[in-house]
Every structure is written in structure tokens, then in C-alpha cells.
Image (cartoon, rainbow, N blue to C red):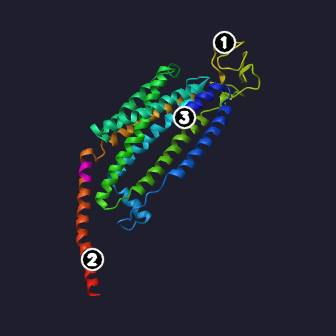
């Protein structure tokens, strides 16, 4: 939220100079990051690790054992598309606003939209936790995926020009809710799967599960970040629509809103709301214009692909075999096993103490 507030303030102060906005935010965030890192080093202490009950397995057998876990394989089947579904809208919202909706002052609209996304993320987390406790984690996750898929499909059917203001901000609320679900519920289900694995193998392998989870997240981010850009490039994408300035790239002269090969926007100032002196005064800024293929690529990856991914994730999430009831049974079995191990260890400890006392008496 701090980032959104700073970004919105800077975009209003330097609305026609995105490069200056980036420079100021880079300095502010670098200083803030250094301060947070110093506080982290000063205040956070590591908790002493408990000695492991068993010798750790080598990497390859450990990974094979992890992949032999049936519920975990099913978890991966819904985790991958859900990660992509929650990632693509956050990555492409700025391109959708600028090139599909063709908004010249895209930065201010983007910051307002993303502020709504973040607020909905924070607001959705307690709602999701409460719903998961009442109806079950996998049930809430699958239902959320279906609802998100329907909402994104409806938004895809709406022309981008009609998404301004209200529809866009409603969509942003849906994006935030979907992001919150992808952050909260899959990790809670993974914890249940780790308990199931411990029950079957006797080993607690949350470290290996976390490593695989982190790598999976990174691979999904690579796909979600690179593929849409490659498709837009091959569809004929040109930065600023081929213009030399405009749409946040500051022109050399203060009387230019944009400067493009086929259109120069002369005005009294370079502000986005400045009245054009020549030509149609309400014409769209050429720096927001892209080939139709590029506009469709942003629209498809921003709306259609997330809708399909959410729908794909809903099916395996609903069929996940570990429910709230079965997880309670798993935890009960684990506690019973720990109690039995503790009870078996007590006579051995008592006999060792008795032998030590007898040896001391003989001495």
C-alpha cells in the first residue's frame, strides 16, 4: 500500500514524465529496503533447530519419495494453473489499460486499480480463512476458482473501451480476491499434505516441499512474464505505438502532448488534459495504438487465459482426497504415534538411569 501511495503521488506530480517517476521511486524504495534490511538483521533471531529423528535422505530418493505422494501430485496439478491465473492479471494490467483500453494517462489509472487489488487482497484473507474453517479448504478453493473463471470470462466478453472506471475497478476487486485465494488456501492444503506424508513415511519433509514449491512458483512466473511479451512482440508490438514521446514519455517541447510519425499533438502544455490545437480535439493518443493482434494478445492473456486456468485448477482442487475431516484423523494418528514413542522411550531412559545409579553405588 505504501508503494501504491508513493507511486500515485509521484504520477500526479510528474504525470507526463514516467522516467522521473521511476527515478524517484527507485531512490525511495532503495532507502526503505536498506532500512528494513538493517532492522531485520538487528531484531530477528534464529530459533534453535531440534535434532532430526532420522538421518536425512539423499536428494534423489527424497524427491522420488515426495513425488510418490499421490495427494501432492494432485496438488501440483491445480497449483500450476492457479499460480499462472493469479500472476497474469497483475503483470498485464498496465498493458491492458494502456494499449487495449487506450488510456493516455495510464499510470494514474494503474495505481488506482492496483490499490483496489491490494485492498481486496487484505480484505479477502480473513474472509477466506473464516470460510475455510466453516466449509473446508479445498471446497472454498474450488468454489473460488469457479467464480473467478466466470468473472474473468464475462470481463473478456466486454469490449476494452467499455471497461473504463466501474467495470475495470470491479474486475480489480476480483483480481485481488483471486490473488488472496492463491496465497492462502494452497499453502494451507500443502501443510495438510505434509502431515499425510509424515503419517505414511515417518519423516517430516516440509523443507523439501518448500523448496519444490518455491521453484515451481519461479518457473510459473517465468512463463507468465515471458510468454505474453513474446506473443505481443511477434504480433507487431511497438513501444509507444512508434511515437518518439507521449503517454508518459516526456517530449522535448512543452507544447507537445505527443510526437508520432503520422500525428503531432500540439497543445498549450504537455499535460494529458491539455486541449489539442489542431485536428480532432478528442482523438485518441497515437502512443496508445497497437496492431489489432497486439491488443488481442494483451486481452487474451489478461482475461481469457486466467479464466481457463482458474477453471482447470478447480477440478483437481475439488477432487483432492484430503478433506478437513480426514486431516483431523491424520493429526490424531500422528499425535497417537508421538505419544506411543514417548511412552516407549521412558522405560529405556529409566533403565539407563538405574544402571547409572547402580554403577555409582558399586564405585
* Vertical order, 111 against 135 (above or below): above
Residue 338 is left or right of residue 256, and the answer is left
* Number of other residues with Cα within 10 Å of mark 3, as a class: few under 14, some 14 to 19, many 20 or more: few
In the rendered structure, find residue 2 and report the number of the disc placed on it.
Answer: 3
Of mark 2 and mark 3, the one earlier in the sequence is 3
- The earlier-in-sequence mark between 3 and 1 is 3
Neighbours of disc 2 within 10 Å: few (<14), some (14-19), many (20+):
few
Q: Which residue is mark 2?
A: 352
Q: x, y (%) of residue 77?
A: 38, 46
Q: Position of residue 161 (x, y in %)?
A: 53, 20
**Drawn side of residue 25 relative to residue 312, left or right:** right
C-alpha separation, residue under disc 2 versus residue under disc 3: 60 Å
In the rendered structure, find residue 281 and report the number of the disc placed on it. 1
- Closer to the chain start, of discs 2 and 1, is 1
Q: Is residue 305 magenta?
A: no
Residue 327 lies in magenta, yes or no? yes
- The magenta stretch is 326-331
Residue at 26%, 65% (x, y): give it: 342
Residue 76 rendering spot, x and y as whole percentages: 39, 48
Is residue 218 in view?
yes
Task: Give the residue drawn at x 36%, y 67%.
Answer: 54
Q: Indicate the quadrant where residue 240 lies.
A: top right
Numbered mark located on residue 159 in the image: none
Residue 266, above or below 184: above
Decide whether the magenta segment is chiefly helix, strand or loop: helix
Residue 303 in view in this figure: no
Q: Residue at x 24, y 78 (%)?
A: 354
Q: Is there CB contact under 8 Å for labels 3 and 1? A: no
- Please report contact status of discs 2 and 1: CB closer than 8 Å, yes or no: no
Q: In the figure, residue 196 lies in which quadrant?
A: bottom left
At mark 2, the secondary structure is: helix
Give the secondary structure at mark 1: loop
Amino acid at each position: 500500500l505504501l508503494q501504491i501511495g508513493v507511486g500515485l503521488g509521484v504520477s500526479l506530480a510528474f504525470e507526463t514524465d514516467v522516467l522521473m517517476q521511476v527515478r524517484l521511486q527507485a531512490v525511495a524504495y532503495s532507502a526503505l529496503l536498506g532500512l528494513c534490511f538493517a532492522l531485520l538483521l538487528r531484531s530477528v533471531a534464529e530459533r534453535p533447530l531440534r535434532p532430526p529423528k532420522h538421518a536425512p535422505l539423499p536428494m534423489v530418493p527424497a524427491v522420488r519419495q515426495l513425488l510418490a505422494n499421490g495427494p501432492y501430485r494432485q496438488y501440483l496439478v491445480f497449483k500450476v494453473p492457479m499460480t499462472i491465473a493469479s500472476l497474469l492479471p497483475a503483470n498485464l494490467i498496465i498493458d491492458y489499460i494502456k494499449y487495449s483500453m487506450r488510456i493516455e494517462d495510464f499510470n494514474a489509472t494503474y495505481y488506482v486499480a492496483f490499490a483496489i487489488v491490494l485492498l481486496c487482497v487484505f480484505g479477502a484473507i480473513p474472509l477466506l480463512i473464516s470460510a475455510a474453517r466453516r466449509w473446508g479448504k479445498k471446497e472454498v478453493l474450488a468454489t473460488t476458482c469457479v467464480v473467478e473463471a466466470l468473472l474473468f470470462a464475462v470481463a473478456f466478453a466486454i469490449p476494452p473501451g467499455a471497461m473504463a472506471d466501474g467495470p475495470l475497478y470491479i474486475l480489480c476487486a476480483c483480481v485481488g480476491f483471486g490473488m488472496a485465494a492463491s496465497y492462502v488456501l494452497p499453502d494451507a492444503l500443502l501443510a495438510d499434505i505434509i502431515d499425510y506424508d509424515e503419517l505414511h513415511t515417518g519423516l517430516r519433509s516440509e523443507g523439501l516441499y518448500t523448496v519444490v514449491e518455491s521453484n515451481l512458483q519461479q518457473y510459473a512466473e517465468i512463463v507468465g512474464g515471458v510468454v505474453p511479451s513474446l506473443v505481443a512482440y511477434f504480433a507487431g508490438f511497438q513501444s509507444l505505438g512508434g511515437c518518439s514521446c507521449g503517454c508518459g514519455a516526456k517530449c522535448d517541447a512543452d507544447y507537445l502532448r505527443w510526437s508520432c510519425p503520422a500525428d503531432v499533438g500540439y497543445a498549450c502544455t504537455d499535460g494529458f488534459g491539455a486541449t489539442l490545437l489542431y485536428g480532432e480535439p478528442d482523438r485518441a493518443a497515437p502512443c496508445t495504438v497497437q496492431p489489432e493482434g497486439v491488443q488481442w494478445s494483451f486481452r487474451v492473456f489478461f482475461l481469457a487465459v486466467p479464466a481457463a486456468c482458474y477453471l482447470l485448477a478447480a477440478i483437481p482442487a475439488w477432487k483432492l482426497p484430503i478433506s478437513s475431516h480426514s486431516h483431523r484423523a491424520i493429526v490424531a494418528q500422528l499425535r497417537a504415534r508421538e505419544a506411543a514413542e514417548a511412552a516407549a522411550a521412558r522405560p529405556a531412559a529409566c533403565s539407563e538411569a538405574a544402571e547409572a545409579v547402580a554403577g555409582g553405588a558399586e564405585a
